[in-house]
Amino acid sequence: MDKERIIEKLNRHKKQPYLDYRLKEETESFTNILFYTLFDVNTPVAKNLDVLAEKFNHLVDLACWDLERPCNKVWDNYVSSLPTVLEKLNLDAEAILNCDPASLSIQEIYMAYPGFYAIAIYRLAHELYAQGFPLVPRLMTEYAHRQTGVDINPGAQIGDSFFIDHATGVVIGETAVIHDNVKLYQGVTLGALYVAKNLQKTKRHPTIMSNVTIYANATILGGDTVIGENSVIGGNAWLTASVPANSTVFHTPEIKIKTVSNV
């Protein structure tokens, strides 16, 4: 084995000069501290906001974000949004407590529900996304995805009192719009009809109006698809067209049960 030749080849094929994985690790650390700052009673808010500001500046450096470095303004705007984010997350936790008969306490929601954690990191990432800060919000939601199995793009728009039950396998695309009091079960996909790069600036994912429940493994696709308010979408349904308000949509599989006699 010619070690020097192998090293030379590897270096030649490392083609991304700004691909610094410290950004991923530092984003995960930033996300953890941010989450604890909002929720953990033993975490000092004032002290941690200073720590987070320093970490944010470091993330800016690692992400090579170069828009005349307006990071102080971005950070100030972001911190100003945190009370509203926390208020929304408290509404999410209350919605879970009120909807799920298995929940025993509000503390259980905050600490043990992967759906709540995924929603929390999405909401925290979405505020940075709205500021135009690239990549870091995506790394934040991917961190939550890895831990919970819920993939929410930070560009999605989600209203108040959102509930994801059981969590695993939920996918919510970048241009999805979800209104208030919506409940999703495991395996739900709010996706695009087509995958093509020239659709990047178009609305590709569905709109879910208020008070909609979508049961396990339902798939709803398309930017023009609107699920009307107060509707119920049954498990395993596949939708690529809009549904009017107050509808019930269900998939009817053919199930056959065959019994075998022991005689």
Image (spheres, rainbow, N blue to C red):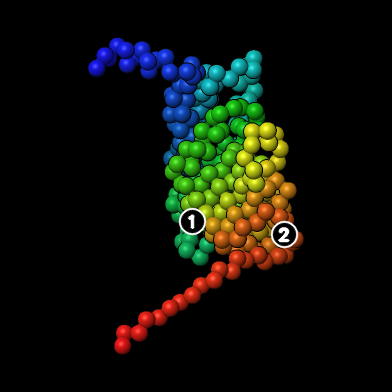
For the N terminus, give its image quadrant.
top left
For the C terminus, give its image quadrant.
bottom left
Q: Position of residue 144 (x, y in %)?
A: 48, 41
Circle 2 SS class: loop
Q: Nearer the viewer, residue 208 or 199?
A: 199
Residue drawn where x is 74% and y is 61% of the image: 245
Q: Residue furthest right?
A: 244
Q: Residue furthest bottom?
A: 263
Circle 1 SS class: loop
Residue 56, above or below 6: below
Pointer 1 residue: 166
- Asked which quadrant contains residue 67, the reply is top right
Residue drawn where x is 50% and y is 50% of the image: 169
Residue drawn where x is 65% and y is 29% of the image: 131
Disc 2 marks a residue whose amino acid type is Val
Residue drawn where x is 32% and y is 12% of the image: 5
Asked whether residue 19 is in view, the answer is: yes
Local packing at callout 2 (Cα closer than 10 Å; few below 14, some 14-19, many 20+) is some
Asked whether residue 92 is in view, the answer is: no
Q: Position of residue 208 (x, y in %)?
A: 68, 53
Compared across the picture, whether 107 is left or right of 181 comes to: left
Q: Residue furthest left?
A: 1
Pointer 2 residue: 243
Q: Position of residue 214 (x, y in %)?
A: 60, 59
Residue 250, above or below 179: below
